Image (cartoon, rainbow, N blue to C red):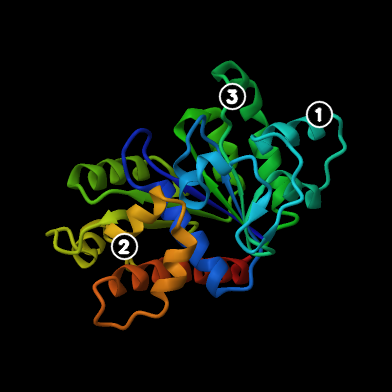
Amino acid sequence: MSIVTFWNNKKEQTGKTLSIAAISTHMAIEHNNKILVISTGHRDSTLDRCFWEERKLKKNLGLFGPNTNTAMEDGVVGLETLMKSNRVSPEQITNYTKIIFKDRLEILPSFKGEKLEYDELKTNYPDIITLANRYYDLVLVDLDDEIGDDLSEPILQSSNLIIASLNQRLTSINNFMKIREENELLKSIKTLLLIGRYDKFSKYTIKNITRYMGEKNKVSTIPYNTLFFEACEEAKLPDLLLRLRKVGEDDRNSFFLSEVKRASENILYRLQDLAMKM
């Protein structure tokens, strides 16, 4: 059971949330893991749109099975109530999530209420993540900068793996390298690098970025792909990844799928490697 936290440098647009959506969906399709994705942001529907349409938000149907959820639209609110009363157990978390693939992939969406409520509620995220880690094989955390450094730090410290999400611009890469010099966690083997919205025709290729940053391991990417971004706006991401499994190597979308697969396998391999070293 592992916590994998996706981090980026404040407001920098790196495609972090869509990268989580692609990786978690691929893992759910290809591996027998029970996965929970937790969005820690406020009123952020980016993850939601990948899997369900807004008008269907209150329905209790998952893609591959019914969700017995009777909680409020924001499942984290129901969890907070239970936690305050000391009545929550790890297996109860699933009652407050949105099921995408039954027994494979669930989502705990971002809080959609008022900012003052969010500021009070967000203090529960470290405990929710820790509790979820006792029930799910993988807990993937979309760490939002709005949660604040005082809460980000304990979440990062408790994570088994940190995915540092960058964009392909040189300034983004240089900024991260400066931050990493002052942060032991980001320098450690607990951190993997991921380039979102990757363009393979840029001069900053995977090979060049890896060499420039002095990385021992090849940097992972989630390439820019038109079908992918459209599917993430139309609640059709699971359908797309299932469909792309059938394409050949000469298909224009095969590079996207192969990189999503590589990123997913890099995460699972590093988790196994770290577990062996403990």
Rendered image: mark on residue 68 = none
Rendered image: mark on residue 113 = 3
The residue drawn where x is 28% and y is 72% is 255
Residues 211 and 141: in front is 141
Mark 3 or 2: the one toward you: 3
Residue 180 shows in the view: yes
Rendered image: mark on residue 215 = 2
The first of marks 3 and 2 along the sequence is 3
Q: Residues within 10 Å of mark 2 (few under 14, many from 20)?
A: few
Amino acid type indicated by mark 3: Gly
Mark 2 or 1: the one toward you: 1
Q: Residues within 10 Å of mark 1 (few under 14, many from 20)?
A: few
State the CA–CA distance, disc 3 to disc 1. Answer: 19 Å
Rendered image: mark on residue 84 = 1
Q: Is residue 87 above or below residue 163?
A: above
**Which structural element holds mark 1?**
helix
